[in-house]
Amino acid sequence: MCEEAFKNVIQIAIVVKDISKAVEAWSKILGMKPQRIIETREWEETKMSFMGAPSKGRAKLAFFNLNNIVIELIEPIDGPSTWKEFLDKHGQGIHHIAFDISGNADCSKKILEIGGYVQQSGMFSGGRYTYIDAREVLGAIIELIEHYKR
């Protein structure tokens, strides 16, 4: 049920200019060792679309798994993406909050019905994601993550 999925924020993501510096700073603040930086895969695997068109936009990512939530750091690289657009327009900052909607694929309709629109979507190893820009009605970009059943 969507209402239950929306009661559990699983991730807050921050777009940064330099992920290496951000990882070092967050590591010090959190008292954790620096987390591994990975890169998103090529379009042939992710099938990413941005604003309704295929995009080869990619990013460097790092994840800090905390007790109650994941902090994701994102540095845009290559091509158009929601991350690059955000960094260009707003500078560094909180980009989105994420919910795991596994098994509830129709949850995106709930946000779209109140006035959001799909900004970006794609696949990752084990699942897919959709960013819905709902800033006009919710004041936030929402990421809906769906993990495939194994």
Image (cartoon, grey):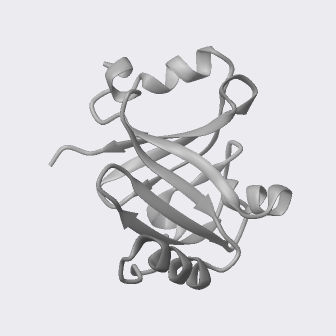
- 133 above or below 79? above
Judged from this view, the residue extending furthest toward the right is: 89
How many circles with numbers are drawn on the protein? 0
- 148 above or below 133? below
- Judge by depth and name the residue closer to the eye, 17 or 58: 17
Relative side of 90 to 21, left or right: right
Q: Residue at 47%, 80% (x, y): give it.
A: 28
Judged from this view, the residue extending furthest toward the top is: 113
Relative side of 136 to 6, left or right: right
Q: Quadrant of the N terminus?
A: top left
Q: Is residue 41 visible?
A: no
Relative side of 62 to 121, left or right: left
Q: Is residue 60 visible?
A: yes
Q: Residue at 41%, 22% (x, y): give it.
A: 106
Q: Residue at 85%, 56% (x, y): give it.
A: 89
- 19 above or below 47? below
Relative image position of residue 27 (x, y in whole percent): 45, 78
- Judge by depth and name the residue closer to the eye, 9 or 40: 9
- Judge by depth and name the residue closer to the eye, 122 or 101: 101
Relative image position of residue 23 (x, y in whole percent): 51, 78
Quadrant location of residue 80? bottom right
Q: Residue at 32%, 22% (x, y): give it.
A: 4
Relative image position of residue 29 (x, y in whole percent): 49, 73
